[in-house]
Image (cartoon, rainbow, N blue to C red):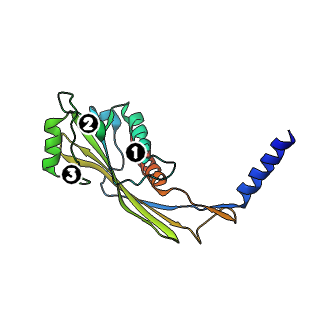
Amino acid sequence: MFRKILLLILISTTFISCSFKTINYSHKFITFDKGIDFTNTSGDWLLNTVKLPEHRNSNSEEIIFETFSKWTKNKVTKRLKMADKKGKKHFLNIPNKPSLQELELINNTTNYKYIINVYSEKDIDRNMSRDSEISIDIYDITHKKLMLSQKVFGFLDKVNGNGIANGVNFIPEMMPQLIKKGLKNIERNSKF
């Protein structure tokens, strides 16, 4: 019992003496629509993540996949499991900003109705700060148009940034936090 109390005191002291740096966020919707009416969507969704840096204990693609699976009632497929209209594995390199011809090709060769494109625009990790930006773009393949586009920005001052205490610095992982913020912005403006 004494060891458990001692361990609890040691953990509490360590927690209090640490500084958890906070990330400053901002976002901008490029499109007029800031959300999606999921009650008016039907068909399969394709998740395409490009250049998302993975960090120690995070899986950015899984965060996006699980969120959109919940929103679409499990109608999302990752690009690595992409299939053609006959159900055979079909692999296309889908760029950040697909052209009308590329959307036409996807429409003609697959059964997917929507593409979720999530990609890193910037991820600069310096000694004193970190500056990151992601984009979340959703395309309606059938109508060959961009339905929703959002940029999420994050800045972390590693030295002078806000912290809850002094001592050892804990630097949060940027990419998963940016993705979660962006998805929350979409969820707040969507219908389910």
**Residue 46 in view (yes/no):** no
**Foreground disc of the pair 3, 2:** 2
Residue pictured at 41% horizontal, 55% vertical: 53
Whether residue 62 sits left or right of residue 172 in the image: it is: left
Residue for point 38% across, 57% down: 134
Image position, residue 55 (x, y; %): 47, 53
Q: How many marks?
A: 3
Per the image, the residue denoted by label 2 is: 82
Whether tag 3 and tag 2 are in contact, CB under 8 A, the answer is: no
Badge 3 or badge 1: first in the primary sequence: 1
Disc number lying in front (3 or 1): 1
Residue 190, image quadrant: top left
In the image, residue 53 sits, relative to residue 63, either above or below, namely below
Say which residue label 3 marks: 98
Give the secondary structure at mark 3.
loop
Q: Amino acid at mark 1?
A: Glu
Kindly indicate whether the residue at mark 1 contacts the one at mark 2 (C-beta within 8 angstroms).
no
Residue in front for this viewpoint, 68 or 62:
62
Left or right of 5 in this view: 92: left
Whether residue 159 is visible, yes or no, is: yes
Q: Secondary structure at mark 2?
A: loop
The amino acid pointed to by label 2 is: Met
Q: Position of residue 65 (x, y in %)?
A: 39, 40
Kindly indicate the quadrant of the structure image that contains residue 105: top left
Q: Could you say where residue 107 lies in the image, as x and y percent from the top left? A: 16, 39
- Kind of residue at disc 3: Pro
User: Which residue is found at the position 25% from the left and 46% from the top?
Assistant: 139
Q: Is residue 63 above or below residue 166?
A: above
* Residue underneath mark 1: 61
Horizontal arrangement in the rendering, residue 164 relative to residue 145 (left or right): right
The earlier-in-sequence mark between 2 and 1 is: 1
- Nearer-N-terminus badge (3/2): 2
